[in-house]
Image: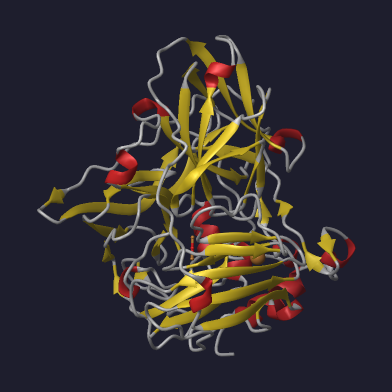
């Protein structure tokens, strides 16, 4: 291999004493995600107000498009009480500003790289031409001298200091998000703050009487850990993130934080009226899964799911709790009229105990009129006919010791094409796993045909990520619409992704 991953693995193995994942934190020899503990006392829950994420103003508009300019730069944030946290942020904020887009209107996003490292931007869930999709080697280099990229890729489109990304927005309304995708360093760079919402709206959705305005709230959930001085800490070999990729073997399964942030605030609270609210929930964590539920639950229908990764569902689905893996989005309506004014309702995470078992709190503080309705028919969702599939492919996601996390036993290589689907054809991909992996395809949205032989409770609608647990098999129906070109698919546990669990497909 012309690439340093093995090198990094060797360093990792050398740095660790013995093979720690064989003794603890492993599942049949596969490393589990584990907490990288904060060195500071955890902040108190439900003290901070939930930050409402600011919407980015367009720097210019014409008949067909809106232009946005953002500098990606180091900045400071106040996340923990009394401490300042150094972050890397789009326009210096974490999470990044919200980009609001309309179907049929192009967005041109001009990013200036003012960080000391290369960046790549990817619009997750976007049907984007390949040159703007943020292929991991399509680096935007920082100013000044920088060591050459270790990953050799003759097709890489390297830019210097800035790049314009063009998003066509020829797709249905959905909650998308943008984040860094730099080869080998995605996990560490997203951890430092490089993620934000991109909300695509259309007329079909705009006509529905769903909660809106102040009662439509985007929630970016992620876990992080902090040093004594309030800094974000991450177990990177090279904390400058300039040259040597990788993290110690202990953390190969994924890095978990012990502080749960929503919109960048630890365990925040939001004051609400006793009406319906719409929450666009994104799990932007590197490796943490959540099982979200309300406590107290207030009757049989606490969470009404109206949308998934790919936009509105055909009809609402009542959920008692929602399992959300890294990069997934759930669009949910909560009706606070089920609670008395004065109630405190916690959004909890049943997938963890202790502090990580809490997410945020809603305080029902006032009575207001509610004109919103959740219609029984939300949207037209038409899937292709599985009788007309052009090809069926099998991908096996597994752990292979020194090779890292692999697909069909091979670590990522930009030179190897794992599939060549034809433009406008539909394929079935059979996904198999040894372990739990949230699997994501760029460019496309897919329908989950079966998830371990059944239909999964969280697989409704159009998806761009499917979460498989150990030993599961899923069949997904994938229409390859949009553009010809090279794209990646990968595990969205960002440590698995950086440790080679990524493949290529080329739409031809
Ligand atoms: Cu959020 Cu390659 O993806
Ligand atoms: Cu994975």
Where residue 218 appears, as percent x and y from the top left, is 44, 38
Where residue 281 appears, as percent x and y from the top left, is 51, 42
Position of residue 464 relative to residue 272, above or below, is: below
Task: State the residue in front, 382 or 211.
Answer: 382
Where residue 368 appears, as percent x and y from the top left, is 42, 12
The quarter of the displayed image where residue 172 is located = bottom left
Q: Is residue 204 left or right of residue 7?
A: left
- Quadrant position of the C terminus in the picture: bottom left
The colour scheme of the drawn protein is secondary structure
Give me the residue at 43% from left, 33% from top: 217
- Quadrant position of the N terminus in the picture: bottom right
Q: Residue furthest left?
A: 63
Q: Is residue 441 left or right of residue 53?
A: right
Give me the residue at 53% from left, 69% from top: 477
Task: State the residue in front, 468 or 248.
Answer: 468
Position of residue 397 relative to residue 216, above or below, is: below
Give me the residue at 67% from left, 59% from top: 254
Count of marks overlaid on the render: 0
Residue 215 appears in view:
yes
Position of residue 172 relative to residue 338, above or below, is: below
Q: Is residue 105 left or right of residue 502?
A: left
Where residue 316 appears, as percent x and y from the top left, is 52, 40
The quarter of the displayed image where residue 224 is located = top right
Position of residue 318 relative to residue 507, above or below, is: above
Task: State the residue in front, 366 or 445.
Answer: 445
Residue 89 appears in view:
no
């Amino acid at each position: 291999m012309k690439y340093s991953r093995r090198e990094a693995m060797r360093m990792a193995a050398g740095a660790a004493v013995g093979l720690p994942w064989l003794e603890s934190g492993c599942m049949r020899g596969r490393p589990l995600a584990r907490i990288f503990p904060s060195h500071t006392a955890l902040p108190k829950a439900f003290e901070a107000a939930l930050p409402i994420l600011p919407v980015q103003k367009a720097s210019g508009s014409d008949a067909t498009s809106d232009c946005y300019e953002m500098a990606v730069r180091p900045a400071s944030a106040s996340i923990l009480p009394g401490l300042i946290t150094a972050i890397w942020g789009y326009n210096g904020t974490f999470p990044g500003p919200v980009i609001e887009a309309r179907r049929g209107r192009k967005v041109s996003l001009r990013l200036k790289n003012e960080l000391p490292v290369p960046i790549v931007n990817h619009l997750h869930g976007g049907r984007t031409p390949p040159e703007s999709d943020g292929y991991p080697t399509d680096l935007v280099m920082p100013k000044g001298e920088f060591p050459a990229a270790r990953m050799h890729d003759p097709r890489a489109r390297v830019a210097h200091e800035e790049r314009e990304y063009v998003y066509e927005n020829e797709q249905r309304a959905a909650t998308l998000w943008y984040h860094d995708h730099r080869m080998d360093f995605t996990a560490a760079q997203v951890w430092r703050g490089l993620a934000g919402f991109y909300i695509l709206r259309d007329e079909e959705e705009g006509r529905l009487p769903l909660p809106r305005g102040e009662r439509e709230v985007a929630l970016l959930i992620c876990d992080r850990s902090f040093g004594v001085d309030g800094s974000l800490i991450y177990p990177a070999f090279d904390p400058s993130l300039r040259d040597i990729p990788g993290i110690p073997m202990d953390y190969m399964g994924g890095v978990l934080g012990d502080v749960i942030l929503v919109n960048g605030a630890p365990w925040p609270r939001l004051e609400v009226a006793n009406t319906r609210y719409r929450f666009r929930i994104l799990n932007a964590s590197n490796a943490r899964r959540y099982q979200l539920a309300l406590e107290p639950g207030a009757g049989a229908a606490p969470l009404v799911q109206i949308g998934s990764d790919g936009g509105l569902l055909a009809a609402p689905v009542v959920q008692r709790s929602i399992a959300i893996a890294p990069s997934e989005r759930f669009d949910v309506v909560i009706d606070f009229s089920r609670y008395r004014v004065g109630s405190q309702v916690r959004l909890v995470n049943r997938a963890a105990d202790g502090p990580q078992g809490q997410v945020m709190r809603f305080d029902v503080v006032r009575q207001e009129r509610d004109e919103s309705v959740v219609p029984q028919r939300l949207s037209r969702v038409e899937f292709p006919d599985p009788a007309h599939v052009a090809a069926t492919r099998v991908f096996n996601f597994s752990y292979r010791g020194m090779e890292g996390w692999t697909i069909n036993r091979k670590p990522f290589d930009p030179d190897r094409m794992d599939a060549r689907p034809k433009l406008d054809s539909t394929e079935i991909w059979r996904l198999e796993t040894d372990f739990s992996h949230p699997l994501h395809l760029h460019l496309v949205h897919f329908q989950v045909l079966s998830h371990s032989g059944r239909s999964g409770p969280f697989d409704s609608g159009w998806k761009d990520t499917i979460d498989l647990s150990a030993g599961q098999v899923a069949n997904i129906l994938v229409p390859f619409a949009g553009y010809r070109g090279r794209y990646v698919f990968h595990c969205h546990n960002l440590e698995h992704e950086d440790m080679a669990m990524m493949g290529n497909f080329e739409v031809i």
